[in-house]
Amino acid sequence: MRITTPTLLLDREKCLHNIGRMVEKAKKSNIRLRPHFKTHQSAQVGEWFRSFGVEAITVSSLRMARYFANHGWNDIMVAFPANILEIESINELAARIQLHLLAVNPETVELLAGSLKHSVGIWLKIDAGYRRTGILPNDHAELDKILNKIKQSDKLHFQGFVVHDGHTYKQPDTEAIHTIHKTSVYLLQLLRERYKSQFPALQLSVGDTPSCSIVNDLSGVDEIRPGNFVFYDLTQQRIGSCTFDDIAVCMACPVVAKHADRGEIVLYGGSVHFSKDNLPQQNSTVIYGLMVELNGKGWTAPVEGLALVSLSQEHSVVKASPEQFDKYHIGDLMFVLPVHSCLTADLMKGYLTLEGERLEHLSGVPQQEVLL
Amino acid sequence: MRITTPTLLLDREKCLHNIGRMVEKAKKSNIRLRPHFKTHQSAQVGEWFRSFGVEAITVSSLRMARYFANHGWNDIMVAFPANILEIESINELAARIQLHLLAVNPETVELLAGSLKHSVGIWLKIDAGYRRTGILPNDHAELDKILNKIKQSDKLHFQGFVVHDGHTYKQPDTEAIHTIHKTSVYLLQLLRERYKSQFPALQLSVGDTPSCSIVNDLSGVDEIRPGNFVFYDLTQQRIGSCTFDDIAVCMACPVVAKHADRGEIVLYGGSVHFSKDNLPQQNSTVIYGLMVELNGKGWTAPVEGLALVSLSQEHSVVKASPEQFDKYHIGDLMFVLPVHSCLTADLMKGYLTLEGERLEHLSGVPQQEVLL
């Protein structure tokens, strides 16, 4: 297939390998893998998960839940504080699948209880240290208050506690990630102790790609919900979650201009393709991607002497060593490992596998196909 | 219309006012306004421009050119170094509209000359100081070389020189923007002097929203190509290109969680809606948006005591003063002026006017509708 504009390539083999490894790890730890589908948002990649026996999934919006429900997924957690304004969508989904929602505030539980027409599983989101959102694990008064409201509803079925340790993304070493993960598991177990007499079946769910990739023994909880691991990216490689070789997506970008005086190559491919996430470098600059070369089987490790150093809306600029600069010409393609695969995939709205197959991404699916 | 998920509101009156003011300024300066349509990417907003007599437009991709050509635009400049890999698309467009392309390198001109089937206008992109891409205005050898190649082609018709002063976005004061604009006009006029005997009809084109908004007398060139001014945003307000009152787009985001202990409100609306562009603050933090309130006519100026201070993929966090914190409840909407309207519009894939009309954005138009 001839590539003429920025295109997101997907190495199916690497992707299947990433999925298989996480499936194995969950099995060994005797816990459920409920992968987060917000990274790929693709019905076809979802099928790859299904082929490994995965049955329960995580999404980050009700639209995403509808999309995957339409593709046969029946056990879906929307890992986002329930948006009461979408009650119609919640009711529509709750009528046909096992829907799991998250609550952070008693008001949300009250509003849900007052307008749900079908049963949903409800989880309390615990803030174990990330400080984005969630109930503090020591705020027993708030927890008791919310749980009492849940008990009064015949539509809300308390499932347990969820944590998302997003601060693992910012850690300087893997030891810190071990500590964060252990802390979360410990805090969740304290909560289980406190509430198991009232809710004997309550479950514990954690999930972020750094912890789930780096920590070998994930036991102590019932479920993990990593997402990014399906593709990985330069951020995860930096954290230590994966090697360069595990990164399963790569941007192909046309060379549109060259500047020999400063060793810069201008690519078609900008912030509307990559997103603006960057990776700080030791010299206090940032990069937006690293270049690889295609080989017979896929792509190589990053090439020395090339880096994506700036992004505009549609352009990007590659800084090139003299040797690398001379290798590329106007009309060539350059191949770039992205800094943040979730956002790049969302912007690219689809994939091209190395076998030439087009896979969809929800953001490229016409709005009306997933409307309520 | 009931809003239940992040939605980009468009104030048609403000937008028409922004368009009208730029149209007037161009008229007064006796130059052509060739607005850049990459900010709105909307057929309907395009019609508003047409109602002001605008006939020539700028876009940043061939896909965008096809979209607007399909909507009746016949004079389109693709203000991006010509991507020779899209020669099929170039030929298809050149057959039906007056297509203008940009070149930076002689290789591009050679490749175009060898494969064009129809006439196109060709402009040389000059780097007047931004240093992203373009030919340096003093690089006469390179200019001569490219122009000689253009002269040898019967399909390439040299139109003149274009500059985009993207560095105006980074200037600390409006005086710097005046100087940058004057410098570019001066450099372009030197080029005209040098080449007018060979190309008596050659034209000069500049265009960035800060210069075109801040400089009153834009004469000295033939054409301006600003784009962002159609909506403006917080970045332009900071630069001095507009007032808060000129900002014509605003995000509506549901409140999904509240954290009284730290005065934080969690919104449904994250980096997949806003983009990650931010605005540095004096205390060395950054913000991703400022809150306004809806009133009968549209929205207010930013409200004191509220700011969007962090973004995840689907969430964002508002820092609120105690007084403001108490005003908002789970299930309310908050209204946010965006930092960078071009990227927000691209991600939101469409608009809702204050009158309740849905307008399209190219990124929400199904791929197959604009395929070659």
Image (tube, coloured by chain):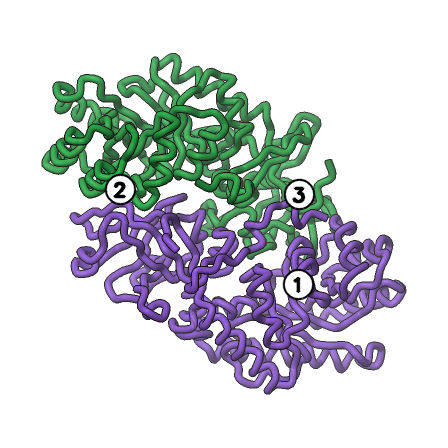
Chain colours: A green, B purple
- Helix, strand or loop at label 1? It is strand
The location of residue A278, given as percent across then percent down, is 47, 47
Q: State the mark number for residue A76.
A: none
Amino acid type at image mark 1: Ala
The location of residue A151, given as percent across then percent down, is 16, 29
Question: Which residue is denoted by mark 2 in the rendering?
Answer: A133
Q: Are marks 3 and 1 on the same chain?
A: no
Disc 3 to disc 1, C-alpha distance:
21 Å
Question: Which residue is denoted by mark 3 in the rendering?
Answer: A334
User: Could you tell whether A185 is left or right of B238 in the image?
Assistant: left
Give the vertical position of B210 relative to A228 (above or below): below
Label 3 crowd (10 A; few <14 / some 14-19 / many >=20): many
User: Which chain does the numbered disc 3 sit on?
Assistant: A
User: Which chain does the numbered disc 1 sit on?
Assistant: B
Disc 3 to disc 2, C-alpha distance:
40 Å
Amino acid type at image mark 3: Met
Give the residue at x 50% y 28%: A71
Mark found first going from the N terminus, 3 or 2: 2
Q: State the mark number for residue B79.
A: 1
Residue farthest to the front?
A117
